[in-house]
Image: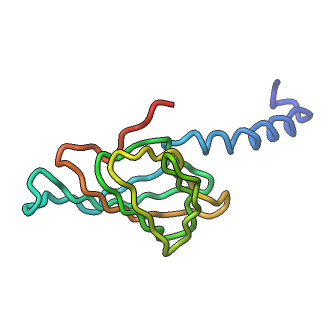
Amino acid sequence: MSIRNPRHLPLACLALVLALPALALAGGHEKIATLQEHALPDAPGKKGLLIEVGYKPGEASGPHVHAGAVFAYVLEGAVVSQLQGQAPVTYKAGQSWYEAANTPHLVSRNASATQPARLLVWMLLDEQAPVLTPLKQ
């Protein structure tokens, strides 16, 4: 199909619009910013990590696991989260949840297709542990 032909433009636009949700849900496009990272002298071998996770409208993280405990707090917007063995839950600004270490996080996505969402996340990890490990799909 050639977009140079004006008759094909509506079809090209429709194809793009239909593809956008699938691209947004593909995961891995969230913005992760480390705000603080500190070794914990009273917990040898452990570190505390404070991060901000930002989701554009419709964005999602891929399924993943954290090697340490996680406390998540919604700063802005709403986020759908689903841990293995649990139903999906929509958390709005001001709400929070806990994830035990090594619990598969199957769904983490912005609940809105029009508004951004932001999370503040505090983690307790082994000093050498990564922030997250992607799960095989």
List x then y, in percent, for residue 123: 29, 58
- Tell which residue pokes out farthest to the bottom in this image: 94
Question: Which quarter of the picture shows residue 19?
Answer: top right
User: From the image, which quarter does the N terminus lie in?
Assistant: top right
Question: Which quarter of the picture shows residue 16?
Answer: top right
Identify the residue shown where x is 87% and y is 30%: 5
Q: Is residue 102 above or below residue 135?
A: below
Q: Nearer the viewer, residue 9 or 48?
A: 48
For the rendered model, the colour scheme is rainbow
- Decide if residue 42 is on the left or right side of residue 133: left
List x then y, in percent, for residue 90: 59, 62
Count all numbered tags in the image, as a single digit.
Answer: 0
Question: Which quarter of the picture shows residue 52?
Answer: bottom left
Q: Is residue 129 above or below residue 71?
A: above
Identify the residue shown where x is 57% and y is 59%: 89
- Decide if residue 82 is on the left or right side of residue 41: right
Q: Nearer the viewer, residue 31 or 87?
A: 87
Identify the residue shown where x is 76% and y is 43%: 17
- Tell which residue pokes out farthest to the top in this image: 1
- Tell which residue pokes out farthest to the front in this image: 85
List x then y, in percent, for residue 77: 56, 68
List x then y, in percent, for residue 43: 11, 59
Q: Is residue 39 above or below residue 91?
A: above
- Decide if residue 114 is on the left or right side of residue 134: right
